[in-house]
Image (tube, rainbow, N blue to C red):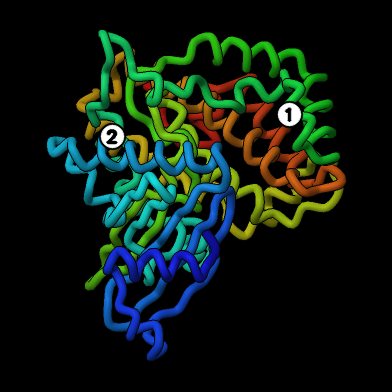
Amino acid sequence: MDLNGVIAYLIREKLIEQQSVVEGDTALSGLSRRNLNTAVTCVSAPSYFVKVGRGPSGNSTVAHEAKVYHVLLADRKSNFQTYLPALYRFDQHVGALTLEYLKKAETLRRYHLRLGRFPVSIAIGVGTMLARLHSVKFPLSDGHQNALFAPGPAWALSMHRPTEDTFHQISTGNMELLTALQSYDEITSTLDRLREEWQATTLIHHDLKWDNLLLIPRIPKKSRLYVVDWEFAGSGDPCWDVGSALAGYLSHWLHSMPLIGVSPTLRYVDLASAPLERMQPAIQQLWNSYLRNRNIDMDEPRAKDLLARSTMFCAVRLLQTAYEQLQSSHKMAANSVYLMQLSANILARPREAAIHLLGIPIR
C-alpha cells in the first residue's frame, strides 16, 4: 500500500469522504519509519494516523500493536485509555492500523527544547502514567504469560553479544561502539547480570523515550500526555520503563553540552545549556509520583531496590541511545562516546548516581 492506497482505504472504510479529497480538505504526509506511517489531516473531519506493515515482520508488529491497544482499552480500572490516541480500525487483511492523529501534539523532546525548562507537573504526569501502565492486567495462558506479550529482556542488555544477524544491519559507528563496549569487562558483566535478573512482572512499553511521549497544550496551563508506538510492548521489567524515562533527562543534559573531541572535561558540564540541577526537581517528582501511584512507601526496601534497578537500567538505556544515534554513522561521534562513559559511571556507582545525578535522596 502506498499513499494513494491509504486514501483509497480510508474512503472504502468510510472514514473520509471522497468529496473532501477532491475539494482539498484532506492532506497527506508520509511519516515512515519501520513501516508505512501516514498522517491524514482533515480540516472539517477527524484526522488519522495510518500505520501499515512492511512485509511479514512489519505486519506482525502492527498486529501486535493493535492487540496491545485492545488490552490497554479493556482494563477500565487503570483508566489508561486517557493516554492513548483513539483507535478507529485494525484491518488484519491489509495490515493497517488506523489511529487518531494528534495535530496539535509535540514530542516531549521538542517541548523541553522549546520551553528551555523542565516543568515538575509534566514529570509528575509521566510518573503517574507509568504507574497506571504497570498496573494494567494483560492476558495469561495456562498460568503463564502469553507468548505474544513476553518479548523477553530489553535487547540493549545483549548488545555486547551481537549475533550474526546484527552484522547484516550494523554501521561502522555501531561497530566502533560495540568494540569499545566489549573492552569494558565491568560493563559487560553487569549487562549479563541485569539480563539474568530481568523481572517480567508487568506490562511495559519497552521503547519509552521522549519521542514517544506527546503533549497537547490545554487551557489554562495543563497539558495532556499521550503515549504512542506500542509495537514492542509486552510483559517486562517495570524498572526498564522507569529507567528509560529517567534517561531522557540525562541524555538531554548531555546533548546540551558543546562537545568537541572525545576527552571528558568539566568545562563541557559548565557550558551545558540545560544544566542538570534544573532537571533534578522534575526527576525527583517523577520518581515520587511513580511510587505514590503504585502505593509504595519511599522508605521501604522495595522502593530502594526499584530505584537501584531503575538507575542501572537508565544507564543501559543511554547505551541504547548511543547505538541508535550511530545507525547511519561512519564513525563514533563525541556524543556517543560521552553517553557510553556516562553509562559506565552510573553502572559502576548506581547509588551515587541516583543521589548526585538524578537528585533522588536515599534515606
Q: Position of residue 18 (x, y in %)?
A: 34, 80
Q: Position of residue 42 (x, y in %)?
A: 35, 78
Q: Which residue is mark 2?
A: 131
| Sequence-first disc among 2 and 1 | 2
Q: Is residue 245 visible?
A: no
Q: Residue at x 74, y 57 (%)?
A: 258
Residue 350 quadrant? top right
SS for tag 1?
helix
Q: Which residue is mark 1?
A: 166
Q: Amino acid at mark 2?
A: Ala
Give the residue at the far bottom of this rendering: 23
Q: Residue at x 53, y 27 (%)?
A: 313
Q: Position of residue 1 (x, y in %)?
A: 52, 59
Q: Position of residue 173 (x, y in %)?
A: 82, 41
Q: Nearer the viewer, residue 202 or 65?
A: 65
- Number of other residues with Cα within 10 Å of mark 2, as a class: few under 14, some 14 to 19, many 20 or more: many
Question: Is residue 319 rendered to the left or right of residue 280?
Answer: right
Q: Is residue 111 visible?
A: yes
Counting every numbered tag in the picture gives 2
Q: CA distance from mark 2 to mark 1?
A: 34 Å
- Number of other residues with Cα within 10 Å of mark 1, as a class: few under 14, some 14 to 19, many 20 or more: few
Q: Amino acid at mark 1?
A: Thr
| Residue 147 higher or lower than 197, as above or below | below
